[in-house]
Amino acid sequence: MTILTCHIAGIGALAVIMFWLGCNNTPVIYPERKDIIETVYASGKIISENEFKLAALGNGAIIKKLVKDGDTVQKGQLLYVIKNEAARERYDAALKSYQNIVTNLSDQSPLLNDLRLSLQNASVKCSNDSLIYHRYKALWAQDIGTKNNLDNVYASYQVSQNQKKIAEQKYYAAINDLKVSHSNARSQLTASDKDLQEFYIRSDRDGVVYQTFKEAGETVYTNEVVALLGNQNSQLICLAVDQQDISIIRTGQPVLLQSDVTGNTIYKAVVSYIYPVMNEQDQTFRVDALFVDQPALSFIHSSIEANIIVQKKNKALVLPRSALTGKDSVWIQVKKNRKKVGIQTGITTLDHVEILSGLNEKTPVLLNTKNDAP
């Protein structure tokens, strides 16, 4: 529920002048000018700014817990280690396969060195057979030698050319195969490393560990929360505002709040963000506020009650709400008679209402406690 509170500044309360009108004994009051503040009540809690729950990504028994409640941590710092023998074996196998392929692609590769030597030998033989063939061909042009000898050396030259092409194809095919294997092995290594890292729970930002939920030796399951972290010296006020009042809430509005932990101490804050989606369970909207002067509070999730200051007017013309008949009418005294008049109201609080028009400070208003005709 939304509660509107009113702070009235001035000397004394509204003066109530008692006129005994016939047998009705109806009291008469006069509007007075006072300072009036309209506020919206909200409850909530103090949370750490950038607060988040750290969850496990893998199943298993916790073998190491490296932090305790209240520790300051840095981004990437290791907090928990989960038992991971199987994942470690998969990673080691993937790493070994990757390293072997890297070696086979290097200058020290036995496979590529053999293929490279075969290609060099084939190239040398092809060059030699080419020289022999062209020598015999030149001699044959001079009618030296026999046609059979020329045909034989030409055949040898053709064979050596084919052997060279085969050696080239084997060499470059091996390189291409190794490159594909290298890409696959790298992908497998990356995947196995990612799987392994799921057993190492790390902080993804700088902050403080407010609470841990698991101890060494306990079993943790995927997506189970193991720790609550947040900013160390920056708190955020998380408020719940009733749906009937959210339309008058604006960013920048002042907030006065009290915490159950600090008792009567009043803190000042300002509305920083209004969430657009309603919580259907309690029909409230979340409103965040920031402390004006950040208090030295080392605790979070403490309950708070707050008043969001919506409007404030100095020396406003006000009446008790009990003097109204309905929402926009009052009974006034005109000489010895009674008259119902319409009024325009402004700020309305739990006890008082601002009068914008229809009355003045000299208008005698009949105090009607039952909100019907006197």
Image (cartoon, rainbow, N blue to C red):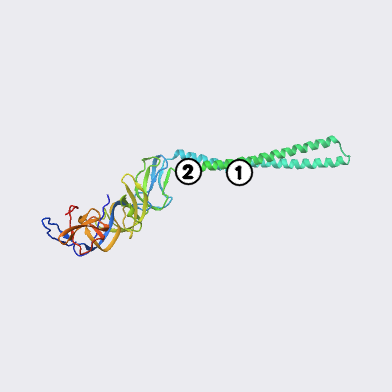
Q: Residues within 10 Å of mark 1 (few under 14, many from 20)?
A: some
Q: Residue under circle 1?
A: 105
Is residue 174 something one can see in this rendering? Answer: yes
Label 2 – label 1 distance at C-alpha: 25 Å
Give the camera-side residue of 307 and 130: 307
Residue at the outermost right position = 143
Q: Secondary structure at mark 2?
A: helix
Determine whether 245 is above or below 14 in the image: above
Counting from the top left corner in percent of width and height, residue 164 is at 72, 40
Q: Residue at x 58, y 44 (%)?
A: 102
Comes first in the chain, label 2 or label 1? 1
Nearer the observer: mark 2 or 1; the answer is 2
Residue at far left of view? 23
Give residue 110's position: percent from left, percent from top: 62, 41
Residue 237 seen in this snapshot? no
| Secondary structure found at label 1 | helix
Pick the residue in front: 339 or 154: 339
Locate residue 260 relative to residue 29 in the image: left or right: right
The picture places residue 216, in percent across and down from the top left corner, at 36, 43
Q: Position of residue 47 (x, y in %)?
A: 33, 52
Q: Say if 199 sits above or below 327 in the image.
A: above
For residue 194, the mark is: 2
The answer to which image quadrant residue 280 occupies is top left
Please rate how many residues cluster around mark 2, counting C-alpha atoms within 10 Å: few if below 14, some from 14 to 19, many from 20: few
